[in-house]
Image: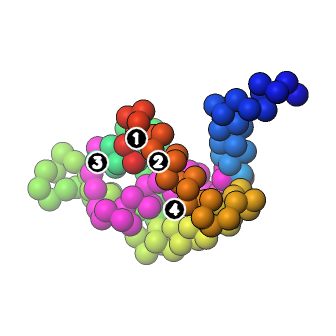
């Protein structure tokens, strides 16, 4: 491999991200889940009930895509959608007990993938990487 390819940080970051993304997708699929399922469940768990528009903003899932994600989660009994008592035109999405159980399962799966992907790094290096990646994202206008 050309030296410039081995040392190009943007390429290395892309390759590491592709590997990580593949492993996350593979392991979530074993639990019949997707990243967007996890994003919605985790957001509801941390922030409480939300409108679909709020969920779209908080998870960065396009509103049109979010509808299908919510349909899947509703069918599985992991979230409920009910009319907002303050504005009947909106639905409030709420995490159910089944959704919370699924979230705990997915948390464990993702922790295992995280350990696998970052196995070569010490805990201090992992923390430093988190800090550096957060700095990069912040610099480029990505909200966390």
Instruction: Decide whether the magenta segment is chiefly helix, strand or loop.
Output: helix
CA distance separating discs 4 and 2: 34 Å
Question: Considering only order in the chain, which callout, 2 or 3, is on the residue closer to the N terminus?
Answer: 3
Cα gap from disc 3 to disc 4, whole angstroms: 21 Å
Residue at 57% across / 52% down in the picture? 129
Q: Which residues are magenta?
A: 24-53
Picture quadrant where residue 143 is located: top left
**Mark toward the viewer: 4 or 1:** 1
The residue drawn where x is 68% and y is 48% is: 20
Depth check, front residue: 5 or 91:
5
Residue hosting label 2: 134
Marks 1/2 in contact by CB < 8 Å: the verdict is yes
Task: Estimate the x, y position of residue 22 in percent, counting from the top left.
Answer: 71, 46
Residue picked out by circle 4 = 76
Of the numbered discs in the image, which one, if any, rests on residue 138?
1
State which quarter of the image contains the N terminus.
top right
- Relative image position of residue 4 (x, y in whole percent): 77, 25
């Amino acid at each position: 491999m050309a030296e410039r390819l081995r040392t190009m940080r943007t390429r290395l970051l892309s390759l590491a991200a592709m590997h990580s993304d593949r492993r996350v997708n593979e392991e979530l699929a074993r639990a019949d889940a997707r990243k967007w399922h996890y994003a919605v469940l985790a957001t509801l768990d941390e922030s409480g009930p939300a409108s679909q528009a709020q969920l779209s903003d908080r998870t960065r899932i396009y509103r049109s895509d979010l509808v299908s994600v919510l349909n899947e989660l509703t069918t599985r009994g992991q979230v409920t959608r009910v009319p907002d008592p303050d504005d009947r035109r909106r639905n409030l999405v709420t995490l159910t007990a089944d959704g919370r159980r699924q979230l705990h399962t997915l948390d464990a799966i993702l922790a295992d993938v995280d350990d696998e992907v970052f196995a070569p790094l010490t805990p201090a290096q992992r923390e430093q990487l988190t800090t550096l990646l957060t700095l990069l994202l912040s610099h480029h206008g990505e909200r966390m």
